[in-house]
Image (cartoon, rainbow, N blue to C red):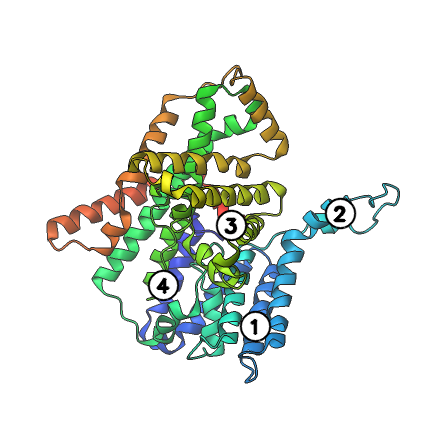
Amino acid sequence: MIFNEFSFLFLFLPIVLALFYIPVLKPIRQILLILASLIFYGIAGLEHLVVLIFDIAWVYGLTRLRRFPGNRILLSIAVIPPLLALGYYKYLGFILSNLGFSSHFLPDGGTEMAGLDFLWDIALPAGVSFFTFQAISYAIDCYRRQVDNPPSASEFTLFITFFPQLVAGPIVRYDQVSDALSRLKSYVPTSSSFFTAITYITGGMAMKVLIADGLSRSLAPLVAAPNNLDTINFVFLVFGYSFQIYFDFYGYSLIAIGLALLFGVRLPTNFIRPYSALNPQDFWRRWHVSLSYWIRDYLYKPLGGNTHYIRNILIIFAVCGLWHGAAWTFVIWGLYHAAMVITFKLSARWWNLFPRIFQIVLTFSLVSLGWLLFVFDFNGLSEIISLLGRGFSGVGIAQPSQDWMLMVIAVVVCWGLRLETIAENPPQTYLRSAGLALLCTLSFAGTLLFVGVSDSFIYFRF
């Protein structure tokens, strides 16, 4: 189930909200949300639901042991099975292929692998990277004695399964939501919290359905025939996809924050205007913030942090690339960002001399070029590089004016709209309240016109 479909908006969500706010059901709100979250996730398949439940039971059971804090052996036992499950579902085919296996033959090309075709057809559980990292972070925090008040079984289960953030984040730390989860029974919404939630949801839906999905349809002909691109097509492809993936993931994050607020839970911000970053290092303080901080706290610092800066930057960005997908293009994307961060670190004194606007444009352009590794495999990239060598002499693909109009809208919204400021500051006058309510209503109505043809969120596959 995904947020941008009618069954979620007009069936699942209204039922869950109605049950949550029935007075006599207040004592079991945690259980209600757990059941709702398991249904939300289980619709995709019972096997994947079993993986999720196993991870929860395994990590929680081990971390409740009195000997767990400070015990490296127990920590390893806690995190290895979830990592193995992640490896099986996400990386097994990639590993076997790189060892020389195919879906039919062994490396020597002679012996057929009868009955093992399924190893190349494993369905990836939605959000497996997200909930695995979330469970692992909790285990490490317990090991480090950073969990002051361990949760009950129901609180921990809800912490992992809470449907607004289950499949695409943010990657939440337990201490960020522990108070809200423990106070669910007594939560009473206010008019301002309701306004904030609806603003986030309608704004995020519009960004996803109207902008990101609109750009996806505009880019489809260009992605399908990279050998026919001319210079204008290439420019549209690079920056169009950059805006598409931004509004797709940013839109999801806004919807997740809004949905969680409806139930009294405040999720952490996952985007801080990343395309206004002044340099590659600054970009990673703004883009997918919860992943950046997870990698910093649970990988970069344990590796020694700045003590071995270049080595550690290369490692963490390679891991970041692999986290996004089981393909060498994702690894190269991670190393591309590592190279940009290292280059900035070595040249910061000169970089910072440039005018602010130049730094923003340069960073945005470099980041946008990197997204091509998300769009094409090596064959497609080789065609792009070949065209680049010929000065983009392709025949060109005609693009209607509405494609460019949508690009202009994306630019204006990206750098001109501050949705968080609007959402977090409810209007104090009736006239402004009515105006913003009308704007949210129109935005949501426009979104509904295209929900039927909306795509799944890009980060669902990570």
Camera-side residue of 361 and 371 = 361
Q: Which residue is mark 3?
A: 460
Which element type, helix, strand or loop, lies under badge 2?
A: loop
Which element type, helix, strand or loop, lies under badge 1?
A: helix
Q: Which residue is mark 2?
A: 99
User: Quick one: label 1, few (<14), some, or many (20+) residues within 10 Å?
Assistant: many
Tag 3: amino acid: Phe
Tell me if residue 57 comes above or below residue 407 in the rendering: below
The alpha-carbon separation of the residues under discs 1 and 2 comes to 31 Å
Q: Which mark is residue 17?
A: 4
Tag 1: amino acid: Val
CB under 8 Å between discs 3 and 4: no
CB under 8 Å between discs 1 and 2: no
Mark 3 or 4 closer to N-term? 4
Task: Say which of marks 1 and 4 sits in front.
Answer: 1
Task: Say which of marks 2 and 4 sits in front.
Answer: 2
Q: Which mark is residue 59?
A: 1
Which element type, helix, strand or loop, lies under badge 3?
A: helix
Tag 2: amino acid: Leu
